[in-house]
Image (cartoon, helix red, strand yellow):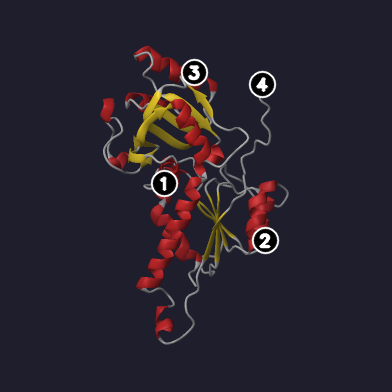
Amino acid sequence: MPTLADVVGILDAAYDPRWAESWDAVGLVCGDPTAEVHKVLFAVDPVDAVVEEAIRWGADLLVTHHPLLLKPVHGVAATSFKGRAVHRLISNGVALLTAHTNADVASPGVSDALARALDLSVIGPILPAASEGAASNGSAGHGSGSGRGLGRFGVLPEPESLRAFAQRVALALPPTNGGVRVAGDPERTVRLVAVCGGAGDDRELLAAVRAAGADAYVTADLRHHAASEALEAGDFAAPGTGPVLLDVAHWASEWPWLSDAAALLTAGLGEIREHGGRDSDREREGGPQRGTVEIRVSQLVTDPWTLHAPQK
């Protein structure tokens, strides 16, 4: 069986921890690198319900997008909910690995998965990674081809109204109580789309989306002032041409990535077997064969909002 070190190596190669933001906390949180891995569970959030799912299923590794310990701590005593999570994971033999902003900027990464869920043909990142070169202004502002960076630009198979596109987004993503919020003319035509999994109301992102001439921007956690000013800026430049905005649940915007990461790990484990790993000599001699690692994507909805009360 592959070890935890084998699995971490595959995921780190795809989502290099060096790509993470300086404030982020990614990588292996707990676990013995020499331990064998039989089951891996992928989830967005390392919340108590997900930890319970991992334990009940008998997972050896839990891979989450969001960090459990984002801010520095001086101890992990089981006197807090985070400390309890760490203790439960360790005492049940479950390792924890986080791929956060390093997965956001990877290629393919979190926003590629979101774009594919919406049936977009990806053009390139909204904000290319420094090593990938800067995007130019104007209609070519989305850069050329694929590459690492934050967010993605993509093109729909055919133009459609904002009303139809909003429905496309609602049906493509897992349902949440917040649904999909839309800012813009429902009959506006949408073809070039910008997406950013997770919180995407950074001013630099919004400015790049506008400069590229995108028709729509799909992201999460759009705050009032950021959204309002983005719409005003678009109308000021040329009325009716700025991007319309679609705000979805943070969890829902990142959930499609889990299947991508799971598939990537499956392929990587297959390559270890094909090219020979630590068990290859023993297998050639008729010893026990390397087992198959079970990989599962959690179906738990960890979006924190539990009720939506419509207002008339």
Point out the frontmost of discs 4 and 3: 4
Would residue 43 appear left or right of 268 to someone viewing this image? right
10 Å crowding of disc 3: few (<14), some (14-19), many (20+): few
Q: Is residue 219 visible?
A: yes
Amino acid carrying label 3: it is: Ser
Residue at image point 43% right, 29% down: 217
Residue nearer the viewer, 157 or 230: 157
Rendered location of residue 176, percent (x, y):
60, 38
Residue tagged by mark 3? Answer: 228
10 Å crowding of disc 2: few (<14), some (14-19), many (20+): few
10 Å crowding of disc 1: few (<14), some (14-19), many (20+): many
Quadrant including the C terminus? top right
Residue tagged by mark 2? Answer: 56
User: Separation of disc 2 and disc 3 at Cα?
Assistant: 45 Å
Residue tagged by mark 4? Answer: 311
User: Separation of disc 1 and disc 3 at Cα?
Assistant: 28 Å
Amino acid carrying label 4: it is: Gln
Rendered location of residue 136, percent (x, y):
26, 30
Amino acid carrying label 1: it is: Gly
In the rendered image of this protein, does residue 172 appear above or below residue 8?
above
Rendered location of residue 211, percent (x, y):
33, 24
In the rendered image of this protein, does residue 136 appear above or below residue 109?
above
Q: Which comes before the other along the chain, label 4 or label 1? A: 1
Element type at mark 2: helix
Element type at mark 3: helix
Residue tagged by mark 1? Answer: 109
Q: Which comes before the other along the chain, label 2 or label 4? A: 2
Q: Which comes before the other along the chain, label 4 or label 3? A: 3
Q: Which comes before the other along the chain, label 1 or label 2? A: 2
